[in-house]
Amino acid sequence: MAELRSRRSNLAVPGSNPRFLEKAKGLAADQVFLDLEDACAPLAKPGARKNIVAALNEGGWGDKIRTVRVNDWTTEWTFQDVIEVVGGAGADLDCIMLPKVQDAAQVQALDMLLTQLEKANGLEVGRIGIEAQIETAQGLINVNQIAFASPRIETIIFGPADFMASINMKSLVVGALHPDYAGDPFHYILMQILMAARARGVQAIDGPFLQVRDVEAFREVAKRSAVLGFDGKWVLHPGQVDAANEIYSPSQEDYDHAELILDAYDWATSEAGGKKGSAMLGDEMIDEASRKMALVIAGKGRAAGMQRTSTFTPPES
């Protein structure tokens, strides 16, 4: 399995457009997924496969996680998508994204196909990860089983547009609040996906916001899943990338505070610190639970490449 690296901004790139594929290499997204599904018309899919293989093999992606979204198992294109992409560029591919996952069996079928292709092409078996996209009511009902369906699973992703259609939601604005609903209509869905991802120990990613030029609205939508604990969100336009990277990273103040908690707790529980189970950091009492919470924030900051601006000094005895 590929290392679970930061996925704050997940840039969607249509595989049918070589110019967009090349432009995506220079954007500051943590992950790019080259799309063979919704962004490609049926007649364009064969050519898009070839474009994606060429773009992956050419390199230039830097530290970005390289993912390809294939078509879902109910179509006639899925197996050929996987065969051509992995067979042509498997060594330069990190993950396959499987859309509209309905149950664990669909993930397991992709796992078996990937294993065969890795063996046939001399690739390390199990290295290519799977990202499962939840886009239907049935998929959400089965999300816990989907999360544990394969050791290749790296992320669970919310796909709002198809999900809204799946449940007959009365809205055409993808990913946004509805003025006739007092709360957040996506809260339950997001929490179900988040719980499954956390139980499995993988990342949870929010789906796209289609009003691509309204960056402030994107920010407001992204904040809702970020505060729950989601690791990142899809971006469909270069203007959304910086906003996603900022929102799904801790603030500098929170990052520094988390690192100070970890240092202070390590010192307090050491021989020099008196082997205490709890301690004071300024006016704040910290203990093992504080350490666990700080690990989350510090981990997000480190993954984002943040640098500390404060240091811990042990108190004088």
Image: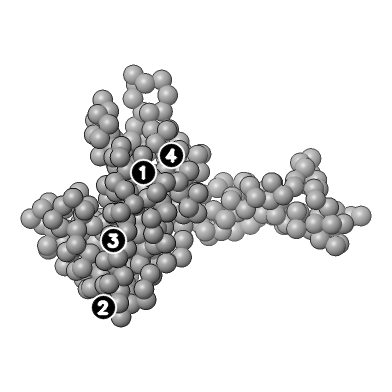
The residue positioned 81% from the left and 55% from the top of the image is: 268
Q: Which residue in the protein does label 3 denote?
A: 110
Q: In the depicted view, which residue is nearer to us: 298 or 135?
A: 135
Answer yes or no: is residue 179 visible. Answer: yes
Say left or right for 233 vs 35.
right
Tell me the kind of residue under disc 3.
Answer: Leu
Mark 3 nearby-residue class (10 Å; few <14, some 14–19, many ≥20): many
Measured as percent of width and height from the top left, residue 55 is found at: 24, 68
Q: Which residue in the protein does label 4 denote?
A: 192
Q: In the depicted view, which residue is nearer to us: 149 or 250?
A: 149
Measured as percent of width and height from the top left, residue 233 is found at: 39, 47
Is label 4 in a helix, a strand or a loop?
helix
User: Which mark is on residue 215?
Assistant: none
Q: Residue furthest bottom?
A: 122
Say left or right for 266 vs 110.
right
Say left or right for 283 vs 200.
right
Q: Which residue in the protein does label 2 denote?
A: 120
User: Which mark is on residue 142?
Assistant: 1
Tell me the kind of residue under disc 2.
Answer: Ala
The residue positioned 25% from the left and 39% from the top of the image is: 162
Mark 2 nearby-residue class (10 Å; few <14, some 14–19, many ≥20): few
* Number of numbered discs overlaid on the protein picture: 4
User: Disc 3 or 2, which lies upstream in sequence?
Assistant: 3
